[in-house]
Amino acid sequence: MKAMIILNPSSGKEKATEYAEKIEETLREKYDDIDIRRTEKEGDAAAFATEACIALYDAVIAMGGDGTINEAINGVAEQAHRPALGIIPLGTVNDFARALNIPLDPHEAISILDEQNLQSVDIGKINKHYFANVIAVGAIAEASYSVSPELKTRLGSLAYFMEGAKSFLSGEAIDICVEHENGRWEGHTFLVIAALTNSVGGFEALAPEASVNDGKLHAFIIKKMSVPKIAALIPSLLKGELKESEEVEYIRTSFLKVTSEKQHVVNIDGEEGEPLPFNARVLPGHLDVFVPFKNEKKLSRN
């Protein structure tokens, strides 16, 4: 049995190395070989994860924020052999971990690895890239790129909310066409957001009916509206009733095609992605992830 630990040294207030030692100690009784890989630049986590697939590792443990987790998933997605994925959340928002009920406390998350409980989860594919949680288009999504690391550290997910609120109030909207399995939608929108899970930007009630393995994207098109209507929308968001609003188009679909005459950049799992157009689809039950209090599948020891 072989396991690879991929860590982002700058995550978790630079305590990632300390946590890696704890992971190695936890895994030692279950794995014969344990390798620790440290990222130095963008793309390293994906490359390490792909290497683990090729070398037939049994598990890959990714430590870091949503960006590091996204890279690890891009490294294993659609490989012939896909190791079980462990997630130790060390980021600002940690949406994928929240959706899987993985504790945000690193020590508690590490303890899950000892249980060796796995759950099959969906991931998404957007053009040639993959995502674990969410894709979004619009000025609000693009505003998140301007949030400084210092502000993220100080305010957490509230920093993204503040930047998003500024974009809402500025009245910026985009013309867009959204095609899905039930038809198409065209018009002016502040934001198109499609989630695989219930947790987006730290808000765990955006799509409360979403499951990590229901094979669907839960898309919300927030139409252009006045400032008073924007304010009225916030309680619906907090109560998980966003899809009930007249100002929101809700779509449950296994694929999305989004186009626009103007160039807009897609936000992929909280990071700056690629410009429109895009085709996105769900890869059902594509990855096995270590989760707490589940007994759906035990890791084989062949």
Image (spheres, helix red, strand yellow):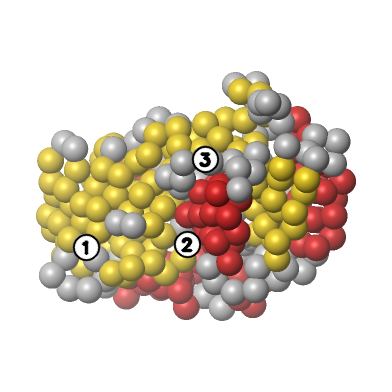
Number of marks in picture: 3
Where's residue 191, x and y in %? 30, 60
Query: In this image, 126 relative to 297: left or right?
Result: left
Callout 1 crowding tier (Cα within 10 Å): few <14, some 14–19, many ≥20: some
Where's residue 114, x and y in %? 79, 34
Q: Quadrant of residue 101?
A: top right
Where's residue 79, x and y in %? 46, 45
Residue where numbered disc 2 is placed:
270
Outermost residue to the front: 55
Q: Residue 81, which numbered label?
A: 3
Nearer-the-camera pick, 71 or 98: 71
Disc 1 versus disc 2: nearer the observer: 1
Q: Quadrant of residue 177?
A: bottom left
Nearer-the-camera pick, 297 or 255: 297
Amino acid tagged 2: Gly
Callout 2 crowding tier (Cα within 10 Å): few <14, some 14–19, many ≥20: many
- Determine contact: label 1, label 2, CB under 8 Å: no
Q: Residue 100, which numbered label?
A: none
- Determine contact: label 1, label 3, CB under 8 Å: no
The secondary structure type at the circle numbered 3 is loop
Nearer-the-camera pick, 258 or 203: 258
Amino acid tagged 3: His
Up/down of 163 relative to 56, above or below: below
Mark 3 or mark 2, earlier in chain: 3
